[in-house]
Amino acid sequence: MATPPDPLHGAAHPQFAAALRELGLDVEVRRFPDATRTAVDAAAAVGCELNQIVKSLIFEADGQPVLVLMDGASRVDTERVRAVLGASGVRRADAGLVRETTGYAIGGVPPFGHRTRTRVLVDRGLLGHEVVWAAAGTPYTVFPIGPEALVRHAGGALADVRERPAVRERPA
């Protein structure tokens, strides 16, 4: 007998929908006709601020995958990630490692529900919102979640890993 469609999680990638059920999370997954692959696209589709979008980014630290959750308006400072992890080097993972580690393609990686368990760093800047929006496993789907719940369900550690703007010196 076929499993009936899941009205709450039906738009999500099947692997992510299974993770939501396993976690007992009742979130509304929204599907859009146009891709929400980038943070800018997702914010426009949802109608929220760019910094309310959660980017789920895979990095490689000393050969091990690490997930960094960052707001959509900011960039990850790999030197800060390296320092937090105590690693000798950190670099952005290629598409193959992202898919192998998470089970999802770049542009649809959710913050949890991955194929393999990885270390997770969550930039503290995400805590400044009541609700943030993250990918639900496809480049067309997102879901809302409170930042504290995001950290908890992702098994993340809070860290300051955002790039800081360059300080410009003023002429004397």
Image (tube, grey):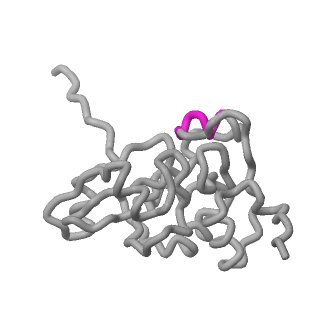
In this rendering, would 131 be left or right of 128? right
Residue drawn at x 32%, y 38% as measured from the top left: 165
Total marks placed: 0
Residue 127 found in image quarter:
bottom right
Q: Main secondary structure of the magenta part?
A: helix
Q: Tell me the quarter of the image containing the C terminus.
A: top left
Give residue 31's position: percent from left, percent from top: 73, 46
Does residue 42 sit above or below 142 in this rendering? above
Q: Determine the residue located farthest toward the top in the rendered image.
A: 171
Taking the spot 64% from the left edge, 58% from the top edge, the residue there is 13
Q: Nearer the viewer, residue 124 or 88?
A: 88
Looking at the figure, which quarter contains the N terminus?
bottom right
- Please check the rendered image and state whether residue 83 is part of the magenta-colored stretch, yes or no: no
Residue 7: quadrant of the picture: bottom right
Residue 71: give x, y in percent of width and height: 50, 49
Q: Is residue 121 rendered to the left or right of residue 24?
A: left
Left or right relative to 116: residue 17? right
**From the viewer's perspective, is residue 39 above or below residue 28?**
above
At x 22%, y 54%, the residue is 79
Q: Position of residue 50 (x, y in %)?
A: 57, 39
Q: Nearer the viewer, residue 118 or 123?
A: 118
- Residue 170, image x and y in percent? 22, 24
- Identify the residue shown where x is 43% and y is 57%: 99
Q: Nearer the viewer, residue 71 or 160?
A: 71
Q: Left or right? Give the position of 32 relative to 100.
A: right
Residue situated furthest front in the rendering = 1
Magenta span of residues? 38-44
